[in-house]
Each structure stands twice: as structure tokens, then as C-alpha cells.
Amino acid sequence: VQLVESGGGLVQAGDSLRLSCAASGRTFSGAAVGWFRQAPGKDREFVAAVSWSVGNTFYADSVKGRFAISRDNAKDTVYLQMNSLKPEDTAVYYCAARSEPSYSVYSYYSRGTLYDYWGQGTQVTVSS
């Protein structure tokens, strides 16, 4: 399966962006889809994830209340709505997918090593 991200760009602090992740080659049915990000010189970190079947969502504390992950079954696409952006949100954002875990546990969704498929990434830059 191929994941294609889009929607990144250069914005000012306080602005909003919406990232999209579309699946190619198979559907997201039965999958967990997550967003991760990596800033220059830093480790990759978890941002948000969603279970495709029931829509459970998970967020990193750093984005809770500002970001929202959602899915569109008809379009087989996952979105990351990012509001009140801060300069520290600047990073390459990656979409990832894995088989949906049996249990709705945060760590099953937040660990990048558990994901099998990754997109190419999209750059988000927030200026102050």
C-alpha cells in the first residue's frame, strides 16, 4: 500500500493547515492510521492516530486541543486539521498505517515502530 500526504506549507503562527493522507493500492479498512512528525535534529514523534473501524482517536499531549484527526470512508482518506499552529510545530509530517490493534490502547497507536507503511512526508513550516 502506498500512502500519499498533501497539504503542507508555510504559514504564520496562529494559522491553520489541513494535511491529507490517501491510500493507494488498498483501502484503509481494518487499519490504524497515524501522523508522526520529525523536526531537524530531533527524533520522530507521534502526533495523532485514528482507528479506521470505530474512529477512536489518540493525540500527543503537545497537540491535544489544537489538532484533530479524522477519516473519510468514502474517500479513503485521513485528515489532520492543525489549528493554532506554533513555530515548534515545524517539521516534516508523515502518515503511517498498520493493522488495527485488537485493543484501543494509546501505546499501540503511538509507537512508530509498530507501523508498516509510511508516506513520503510533507513539510510544515510555521513562522513566528
Image (spheres, rainbow, N blue to C red):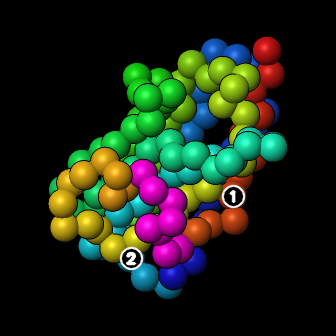
Q: Which residue is mark 2?
A: 27
Q: Residue at x 51, y 81 (%)?
A: 1
Residue 57 lies in quadrant: top left
Q: Is residue 24 visible?
A: no
Residue 101 lies in quadrant: bottom left
Q: Nearer the viewer, residue 100 or 5?
A: 100
Separation of disc 1 and disc 2 at Cα? 19 Å
Q: Nearer the viewer, residue 102 or 75?
A: 102
The answer to whether 9 appears left or right of 116 in the picture is: right
Q: Is residue 63 visible?
A: yes
- N-term-proximal mark, 1 vs 2: 2
Note whether 43 is above or below 30 in the view shown: above
Q: Residue at x 35, y 52 (%)?
A: 107
The magenta segment: 110-117
Q: Which residue is mark 1?
A: 121
The answer to whether 4 appears left or right of 78 in the picture is: right
The answer to whether 1 appears left or right of 72 in the picture is: right
Q: Is residue 113 magenta?
A: yes
